[in-house]
C-alpha cells in the first residue's frame, strides 16, 4: 500500500464528533428503547409471542417475549410467512409460507438454497 492510510491526505473524511454529540445520540437511543420495549411486550402478549417456561431447559422463571423487534415489523410487511411466531429458526408454518409464496426480500438465500 502506498500513500497515507488516514488523515486529510488519504481522502477519507472523518466525523469530528464532540463528546456532547455522542451523549445526545446515546440518550436518544436509550429513550427510544425504553419507550418501545413495553410496546413490544404488549404486542407479544396479544399475539401469543410469549415464551412460557414449561420445562427445565429454560433458564427464565416467568414469561418473556420471544418476538424479535424486526420480526414484528416483518410480520406486518410480509404476511403469510409466520414471522410473528419466529423462534430464531424456520418453523413449519414459515416453510409452508415459503412454499406457498416463494422467498421474500429479507430471506437469507444462503440458508434457503432449496428454494432458489
Image: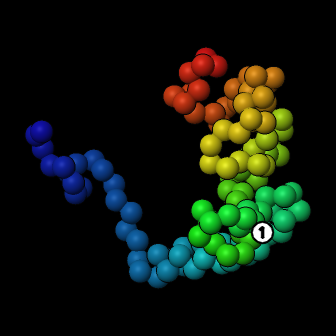
Q: Quadrant of residue 52?
A: bottom right
Structural crowding at the residue carrying mark 1, measured as other residues with C-alpha within 10 Å and reported as few (<14), some (14–19) or many (≥20):
some
29 and 20: which is toward the camera: 29
As drawn, is 12 to the left or to the right of 103? left
Vertical position of residue 95 compared to residue 59: above or below: above
Vertical position of residue 99 compared to residue 23: above or below: above
In the rendered image, residue 81, in percent from the top left (x then y), is placed at: 78, 36
43 and 10: which is toward the camera: 43
- Which residue is drawn at the image coordinates 74% and 27% (left, top)? 98
In the picture of the structure, the residue carrying the numbered disc 1 is 41
- Which residue is drawn at the image coordinates 12% and 39% (left, top)? 1
As drawn, is 57 to the left or to the right of 62? left
- Which residue is drawn at the image coordinates 56% and 21% (left, top)? 113
Its colouring scheme is: rainbow
Q: Residue furthest right?
A: 46
Secondary element at tag 1: helix
- Which residue is drawn at the image coordinates 41% and 80% (left, top)? 19
Identify the image quadrant of the C terminus: top right
Amino acid at each position: 500500500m502506498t500513500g497515507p492510510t488516514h488523515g486529510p491526505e488519504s481522502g477519507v473524511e472523518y466525523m469530528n464528533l464532540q463528546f456532547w454529540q455522542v451523549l445526545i445520540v446515546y440518550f436518544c437511543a436509550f429513550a427510544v428503547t425504553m419507550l418501545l420495549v413495553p410496546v413490544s411486550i404488549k404486542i407479544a402478549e396479544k399475539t401469543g409471542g410469549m415464551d412460557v417456561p414449561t420445562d427445565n431447559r429454560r433458564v427464565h422463571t416467568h414469561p418473556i417475549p420471544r418476538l424479535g423487534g424486526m420480526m414484528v415489523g416483518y410480520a406486518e410487511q410480509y404476511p403469510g410467512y409466520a414471522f410473528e411466531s419466529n423462534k430464531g429458526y424456520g418453523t413449519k408454518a414459515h416453510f409452508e409460507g415459503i412454499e406457498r409464496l416463494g422467498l421474500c426480500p429479507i430471506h437469507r438465500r444462503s440458508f434457503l438454497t432449496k428454494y432458489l
